[in-house]
Amino acid sequence: MIRDALDWRTWSPKTRRQALGLAVGLMLPLGSALIANALDTYLDVRAPSMTFLVSVLLAAIWFGRRIALATALFAFFIYNFYLTEPRNTFGFAGWEDVLTLLIFVGTAVLIGGLAGNLHDQRARAQTQVQIFSGLFAVSRDMADQRDEEGALALLEAGVRQVVAPSAVVFAVTADGGVRGLERGPSDMDSVLRVFVESGAATVDVSRGWRLQMLRVSGAPAAVLAWQPLAGAASAEHNIAVQLMVELAANTLERLRYSRRQVELDAIAATDTLRTALMSSMSHDFRTPLSTILTSASSLQTYGDQFNPATRADLLASIQEEAERLNRFIGNILDMTRLDAGALKPRADWIDLLEVFDNVKERVAKRSPGRSLRIVAPAAVPAIRGDALLLEQAVLNVVENALVHAPADSEIRLGAEYSERAVRLWVEDDGPGVPASERSQIFDKFHRLKGTQNTQGAGLGLAISKGFVEAMQGGVRALNGSDGRGLRVEFEFPLHAALENS
Amino acid sequence: MTGRLLIVDDEPQIVRALRPGLLAAGYEVDSVGDGREALQTIAAGAYDAIIVDLGLPDMDGKDVIARAREWTDTPIVVLSARHAEEEKIAALDLGANDFVAKPFGIGELMARLRAVLRVRGARAAMTDKMSIGHLDIDFSNRRMKVAGKEVRPSPRELRLLRAFTQHIGAVLTHKQIVAAVWGGDEHVETQFVRVLVGNLRQKVEIDPARPSLIITEPGVGYRFIDPNEESAASS
């Protein structure tokens, strides 16, 4: 026990400091004696009481009043012993000694008291600095929070670190209940519920806990429960907790606002899409329908006045426009399937050359007189996917080229491969697409700005992209190989194809 | 009735479908594919009527109408989508004479063309007395007979009737009716137009609930038709 008590490592910081003060308080007068002696011997200066006063002063400033008093007494004895006549003996020399002792003690009391106040103030300032730097850190981290749970966890950690080790945050759920951030229901549940329902801002409950409400847009969002530390700096702690709760509330408000904004943006995007779809329907369906209706009614009214060539032409236009309508409907259905995620591509081995031949055949049937050249090595590897979807994807790109490139120009359809990927491309000699707009040509209902061409719903390329991506491929648009026209590439990674197999 | 027509439409298939019928009806037909060319062609050639598709690649069809109206009063018939009321009204207020909603049959277009061409002739030869279907009107004496029975129109109703009969077969927008009846400067609620048309219908229609003369063009205005003419056109 005694050995334990003597082991300084078991002492509290305060006791350690007292012991240190006592030791220093003994050393200081000894030092003063040496200095006074040296001054006397070498410089013939006799100011012993001054040097001893300095030691009392230092003790008072460093360790406060009590150590200073001890130092003062000790200093008096040494002073008396070494420096006053008769030397090296204790002797009462009269009123001068009494005065010296009184001055030492008075200085110790006075300076020690002042130093004590200074000490307290410094401790308080340190607490404030600690609180403010803690608040600063919390507010900086709050700004980075992306979800509500994180913001509340940060509040909890912030209060624990800056103010009080006992702090817990509970989120208020939509039904007015509360739950801890990590734990499930807690033993405070009923108390918290009552508190939430009471609408109070703060309340003290049992065992020194204080509950603090966090409101977002007026509605309870969370409750902070914390145990204020007794004593020091409680006013500052209260303010710090208030500020942190405010910070968390503002963060929650910001998060809720931005989430709403995202929702509104999504609604606006849906609206834009719907408007685009409506205008596309109105144009792309009415034009063929008008042609069909006009041709049919003309044939009905004036048929017998028309020569056979005119009649054949009107009948042909009825058939073509009906086919065009059918394609539009097909496109819209494809797009709907893609949007709904209902597309389940088959995973067969696809012979690309066969796909190219089919596309060429369909183009020849639909646009006789247009030239489509196939540029592909015979050994192009097969890829894994859905041949029908790929054929439609390629055909849509080719049709886009047919629409935009001059009627007498050539459209090239090709394939190339490396160990890692197979690349399909379609190239035309049309006006091309400015680099700034190239990434958008695969967007739904996209038409080039200022375009002369209003054919098509703007769905073809979007469908191509959707089909290719459904088969783990990628699409991109580039300049034509000789700097003019448009080149659209599909790339299918070969390793993916092997893994799929 | 024949004449020279200009079709302003960027859809070649529409022109291809329209041309034979128009030719068979005795019109000469030219066509252009965009607004700029249209304005040049209108300025250069003497056309009796112009058919304008509002959706043009280089400029808004409404702008073509507004620009053309700066120097010519050649009748203009607009081709527009059925549900684009705003657009129709705007085109009509800019000076288009009538519209046909897509998709349309050739008969509908022929009727509109006949109407706008006749309006032009009617304005040149304005008559005091006229007979339309079951209706006999004597404008100078402010008298009219409905199926032989004398009816007294109010001055406003008479002014409205006058505006209608000058545009038989062609649509009149609310704004045009206000201009004709109340004078252009006055601010008049659409509701007043409805009431006035309703009153006139009570007097001139055999069955006001199922009008045969004054037809409502929903959202746009009214059309006064000649029942004999219209039944011939829709056949």
Image (tube, rainbow, N blue to C red):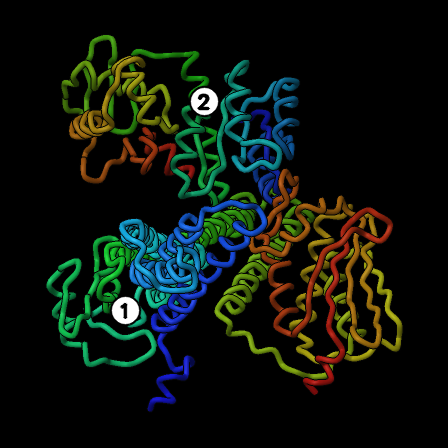
Q: Amino acid at mark 1?
A: Ala
Chain of the residue under the numbered disc 2 shown in the image: B
Instruction: Judge the density around disc 2: few (<14), some (14-19), many (≥20) Cα neighbours within 10 Å.
Output: many
> Which residue in the structure is indicated by mark 1?
A171
Chain of the residue under the numbered disc 1 shown in the image: A
Total labels drawn: 2
- Residue drawn at x 32%, y 28% is B224
**Which type of secondary structure does the marked residue at label 1 adopt?**
strand
Q: Amino acid at mark 2?
A: Gly
Instruction: Check chain identity for marks 2 and 1: say if they share one.
Output: no
Task: Residue B16 in the image: state x and y as whole percent.
Answer: 63, 43
Estimate the spatial distance between the alpha carbons at disc 2 and disc 1, rounded to whole Å: 66 Å
- Residue drawn at x 51%, y 18% is B69
**Which type of secondary structure does the marked residue at label 2 adopt?**
loop
> Which residue in the structure is indicated by mark 2?
B95
- Residue drawn at x 16%, y 30% is B202
Which of the 4 image quadrants contains residue B220? top left
In this view of the protein, which residue sits in the foreground, A134 or A245? A134
Task: Residue B80 in the image: state x and y as whole percent.
Answer: 47, 38
Task: Residue A387 in the image: state x and y as whole percent.
Answer: 69, 76
